[in-house]
Image: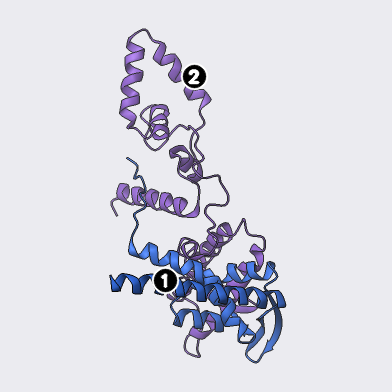
Amino acid sequence: MKITVSINLGGYSFNIDEDAYGELKRYLKNLELHFAGEESSSEILSDIETRISELFRARLSAYKQVIDMEDVRYAISVLGNPEDFSDEEAQSSGSKFSAPGYHRMYRDPDRRIIGGVCAGMGAYWSIEPWIVRVIFIAITLAGGLGLLIYLILYVVLPEAKTTSQKIEMKGDPVNIKNITDSVKNEFDTVRKNMKL
Amino acid sequence: MYNLKTKIMDLENTKAQMRKGILEYCILSVISRGSCYASDIIKELKEAKVIVVEGTLYPLLTRQKNAGLLSYRWEESQQGPPRKYYELTQQGKNYLTDLDRSWDELVESVNMIRTRQQNN
């Protein structure tokens, strides 16, 4: 037994499994982000919703009255993910909601040992954090200045909390593909930690 | 460790680049034969293998409409809500005539180069 949700898509009402609803919502949100810079983004989205509702209707029958995960995956495979169609578009859209390669220094909470300052600097310059750590330790041993610099940086640098900040920290352009990749990486790490 | 994304010139990429250029032209050509519904356009483009995913089409239709090349009207349908039917405007027709001409020139140029290579 599963809980279903009732949705209005392109003027039609559908009963959809809860997990499938989550997937569809995520997909539509991705599209919304992708088309955010377009002149008539809401029109494009409503055209796409109409098409999805058409695809769904073709898959329902007297014996199948609820949209499930497979139907949502099917619709997504037919319409494609944003990164699929940006390849095909005549005018390349690129990343719309952040300048490419926007680059800031943050503290990296994922690879920190103390406060993530060295890890963040490593991420910013694309070098291994231990190189930065060795330099800090050397400056500290040479007179204690390293510790002071570390404390100042700890206060001044913000922590990279959101996914887009983590991407900015590495200097990659913030677009949907990078966010998705980064979120997937996080999921994988969590899964590994839980040994699932 | 961060992977530096390297763009490698591969066959798929070249093909995608080629398709990109002609997609807009193909959409206008399909619509020029009479007003049609987005799903009809999609069907033809898929059969001709110019698009892989349907999502590509919708932003292009909207852009062409905004550029004044297309217009649409709502038409009642028997099984469901009214559908959008697209048509070429006069400006769209002129634009397409121009594209037809430049396509013919392109085909001619490419053919000329290809046959020459074979002769040598």
| B119, above or below B11, in the image | below
Q: Chain of mark 2?
A: A
Q: Identify the residue at horizontal 45%, vertical 81% (top origin).
A: B48
Q: Position of residue A171 (x, y in %)?
A: 45, 40
Which residue position holds label 1?
B110
Q: Chain of mark 1?
A: B
Q: Position of residue B70 (x, y in %)?
A: 67, 75
| A55, above or below A104, in the image | below
Q: Are marks 2 and 1 on the same chain?
A: no
- Chain B is which colour? blue
Is the C terminus of chain A in the top left, top right, bottom left or bottom right quadrant? bottom left
Question: Between tags 2 and 1, which lies in front?
Answer: 1
Helix, strand or loop under label 2:
helix
Give the residue type at disc 2.
Answer: Ile
Q: Using the image as rendered, state which of residue A130 and residue A22 is in the foreground.
A: A130
| A120, above or below A44, in the image | above
Would residue B87 appear left or right of B104 to someone viewing this image? right
Give the residue type at disc 1.
Answer: Val
- Residue B56 in view here: yes
Marks 2 and 1, how far apart at CA: 64 Å
- How many neighbours does mark 2 have within 10 angstroms: few (below 14), some (14-19), or many (20 or more)? few
Q: Position of residue A29 (x, y in %)?
A: 56, 60
Q: Using the image as rendered, state which of residue A89 and residue B14 is in the foreground.
A: B14
Which residue position holds label 2?
A152
Q: Quadrant of residue A136?
A: top left
Q: Using the image as rendered, state which of residue B2 and residue B91 is in the foreground.
A: B91
Q: Position of residue B45 (x, y in %)?
A: 49, 79
- Chain A is which colour? purple
| A95, above or below B79, in the image | above
